[in-house]
Amino acid sequence: MTFGKVLHRSLGMASALVLAGLALLTFVDVVGRYFFNQPVRGAYEVIEMLMGALIFTALPAVTHSDRHITIDLLDRATPRRLVPLRDMAVNLISAIALGIIAWRLWLLGDVKAEYNDLTAFLRIPQAPVVYAMSVLAACACVAAALLSLRARHRD
């Protein structure tokens, strides 16, 4: 199994686990709040971080498998010979956008680390989460760049 497939499966599994944790925490928080008047302490902060983790663990896996949401309004109007060029351009633009997102997240992580930013209630350090999001966005950037190269060499 290639490194890309191992990474894809690992991130897919991580996304599934994060989603399960998110659903469980939300369920327990709602039940605690409405039936026992006792919500989970800090649930909002943890849910906020888990949402970021869910998005950024899924992003490289979705990009690697070329499963992003697409709009096919112009597919029928695009000449067959231009499809590889179109796919190459779209994936290249995606790679550039993801690279910028990764770069900006890294800079945000630096700011959060410099100021030792913590969540308000649970006092969880924010910088490691932002750095992880940056690395995962960079992985998605590489996946999009590889898709662009693959489209270029397609018939």
Image (cartoon, grey):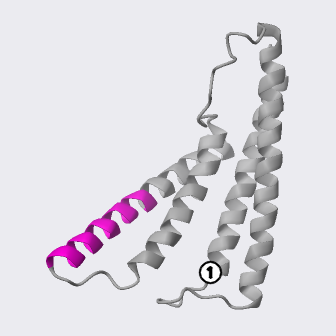
Q: What stretch is highlighted in magenta?
A: 18-35
Quadrant in which the N terminus appears:
top right
Q: Nearer the viewer, residue 33 or 101?
A: 33
Q: Nearer the viewer, residue 66 or 112?
A: 112
Residue 48 x, y percent position in the rendering: 50, 70
Q: What residue type is labelled 1?
A: Gln
In the image: residue 122, left or right of residue 102: left
Label 1 Cα neighbours within 10 Å, binned few <14 / some 14-19 / many ≥20: some
Which secondary structure is most common in the magenta stretch? helix
Quadrant in which the C terminus appears:
top right
In the image: residue 20, left or right of residue 52: left
Residue drawn at x 63%, y 21% is 72
Residue 14: in magenta span: no
Relative vertical location of residue 69 with respect to residue 18 in this rendering, above or below: above
Residue 59 x, y percent position in the rendering: 62, 50
Residue 104 x, y percent position in the rendering: 79, 65
